[in-house]
Amino acid sequence: MSQFENETIQKIYDGMVAIENDAVLSAVDTALSDGLNVLDVIDVLRQGLKVVGDDFDKMIRFLPELILAADLMQEAMKKIEPELEKQDITEGPSATIVLANIQGDIHDIGRNILGAVLKAAGFTVYDLGHDMKATAIIDKAIAYDADLIGLSSLLTTSLPFAEEVIKQLGDRDLRDKFKVVMGGGAVTPEYCEEVGADAYGKDAGSAVNVLQGLL
Amino acid sequence: MLSIFEVLKRADEGKFIKESDYDMKLFRTCQKLVKEYEIKFDSEQIVVGDEKMADAVFQAGVKLALEMGMYQVDTSRVIDITENEIKLTLQVAPKKMILGLGRDSRVLRARTFGDGHPMTVCSGCPGTPLPEHLFLPVMMSYAKEPLIDILIPGSLTEVDGMKVKTGGPLEIRATRQEMIWVREALERAGRPGMHIYAAGESSATELGTLAICNDRYMRASDSHMIPVLSELKTDNIRLSRVMTGWDYPSFTTSLIDPIIGGFGGGPEGAAIVLTAAIILSTAVYNVDMHCIHSIHNKYVSVSTKEGMWLNSVVGRAFGQNAPLALLADAWTTAGAGTEEILYEAAALAIEQESSCLHTDSLGATNGIYPNCSGLEGRFFAEVVHAVHAAKMTPDEANALLLKIWKKYEHGFDNPDIGKPFNEVYNMKTITPLPFWLDMYHKVKDDVASMGLNFLT
Ligand code: B12
């Protein structure tokens, strides 16, 4: 059953829901060359992605599908961005975040979910992986010209390394350059306040709002 | 079982694959196997009695183990195993172990249906971060409970007022201090020979585990833990723990956390992943027993319907096909001092006792807050023994579980994490405070009124 009048828009939606890269990307090409409204194109991509996200919440679809759909969204956006620039339209939070599990911590499931959800919400995400040292995290944040540093910590005994990130940002005169947000089971809002992080994220869903609030 | 040297060789020389490609291959393979073997989660049939489906999960798990092997993330290579190696592994895996020493020792069996033995009850606060002042009293509260057979420690996150950092010198000190205090707790409770399960919980790397390989800390009669990284992966640190266990005589246990909603897919795919992980870790890690811990990707808790079903079907799969000593985690959303944790405990105890499993302890608040105590461990054990004595069929156990489920299902979205140990127990006498004891009696009466005859 089609819910969109325009056939190309319908194709983008169906392809996104089914996470079919070729179908979506070629339909986006068609949409752009046909001169469809870029904001409509972005909107339908989001609608399709939302179906995948909702299915993930209901456990109808799973983490790998969420990751694939978020990656597809980013690829489609890459095609759309030059058009946005041409038309001088600013769209969504074009912020960049580096994400990492800090030194000693290999718990990566939450970070994987978070990365996918943030990508889907339009953030540029650099996932640095797990067991990352403070210096390396900051160096990467500089290299990627990030706006945000997201630290995931599930181990209480790795938390001192998260504090080290904030301390080192101060020591390197970089504290104002990045907003630092923390999450994961070992972190609490009180802890974030105590160590001077900019925000706390309870779960991936609420993290989007928290991060947007920081920008 | 493979020799550690053979494992290391395969980890260096096995086929190369990028980690993300391995993950996606796992997902696709699981999806295929779920369809092929017609495995189906049923939210109304949590205690699984379907023998055919359990067999299917077992066969699919063997296929997955053969197809995927175990992935070594530090070398990006696959440690493959053959069908014959799987057969031999399952054949020689221990079927009966004496854990602990002297009069405090207990038998841990690879359970089979109808073998006439109840589970071995492990209790404690697995890996839960505990401050120094709570560590000893919390451990004593478990050691004092007669129905608790073996004990699992929490982790010590500070030493002499200093924060412990993973992989640093304080990890050594913390892990040793953990063992000294657990032993003291056992001695003070008059149970000096009790088995310490997963000794060295304060160690997140290999350092702490190595540091306790000495009779003063971890004895041959204790066990230490070697996690499998989710899903079906390992690394140098975990393999260093395998090497540690190679020529140190204590027992070893795996820790396997299949993620429901993760790379295995839903509960059905996660069941296949868990089965494969049990097989692979028996072969590659050479462990004597397994800690299985299903993770709900939204709520974490094992007390979700998906989590309990997963444990149950995999417990039955091994009970019917290849008995191994499986200790299932029983992690709850709620914490000590709430009615909910007791209902969650009851549901988990029913499910595990009816599914050829042992327990690796309740984990209050999913192991995050020190809101735990021996009393909920006592209640769990009482339910286990009542269920065993009643010789319930899977359907009877399931019907009771579903009644209990209604008493705590509201807690997932809005958890009541309860109170820390020092607010539910008297810190001098290490006994439950009156309000907590009253709550326990109230819930016990309620569960009894649902049809469970407690022995005491
Ligand atoms: C799964 C798991 C494992 C798996 C990890 C698999 C993997 N690839 O990730 C395995 C088995 C390998 C494992 C190993 C260990 N684990 Co573990 N593990 C867990 C468990 C049960 C669930 C974690 C999980 O995946 N949750 C599901 C995801 C979806 O949720 P999440 O991670 O919380 O993420 C969400 C939010 O928190 C948020 N979020 C997360 N990060 C961030 C970051 C930002 C910036 C924001 C905004 C939001 C955000 O968004 C996510 C999505 O909604 C937790 C218990 C718990 N309550 O968390 C213990 C737990 C974290 N582990 C623990 C321990 C002790 C260990 C071991 C030391 C065990 C041992 N004896 O060896 C090792 C340590 C390994 C290491 N060095 O890191 C302890 C830590 C205690 C502490 N506070 O220090 C816990 C709490 C359990 C316990 N009590 O034992 N573990």
Image (cartoon, coloured by chain):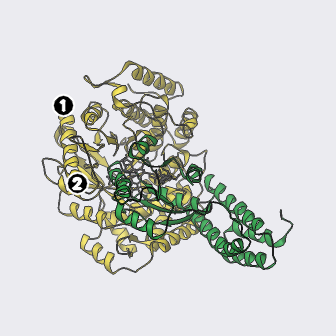
Chain colours: A green, B yellow
Q: Would residue A7 be found to the left or right of residue B81 on screen? A: right
Chain bearing tag 2 is B
Residue type at the position of mark 1: Arg
- As helix, strand or loop, the secondary structure at mark 2 comes to helix
Compared with B447, B193 (above or below) is below
Please state the total of marks drawn on the protein image. 2
Chain bearing tag 1 is B
Image quadrant where residue A106 sits: bottom left
Label 2 neighbourhood size at 10 Å, few (<14), some (14-19), many (20+)? Answer: many
How far across and down, in percent of the image, does residue B312 sit?
48, 49
How far across and down, in percent of the image, does residue B438 sit?
43, 20
The numbered dot on residue B188 is: 1
Residue type at the position of mark 2: Gly
Image quadrant where residue B88 sits: bottom left
Mark 1 or mark 2: name the one nearer the start of the chain.
Answer: 1
Q: Would residue B333 be found to the left or right of residue A5 on screen? A: left
How far across and down, in percent of the image, does residue A140 sit?
42, 68
- Which one is in front, B319 or A118? A118
Residue B100 visible in the current orientation: no
Query: From the viewer's perspective, is the residue at label 1 or at label 2 nearer?
Result: 2
- Which one is in front, A14 or A39? A39
Compared with B13, A124 (above or below) is above
- As helix, strand or loop, the secondary structure at mark 1 comes to helix
Q: Residue furthest right?
A: A5
Kindly identify the residue that appears in the image at 48 percent across and 36 percent down: B344
Compared with A211, B63 (above or below) is below
The numbered dot on residue B208 is: 2
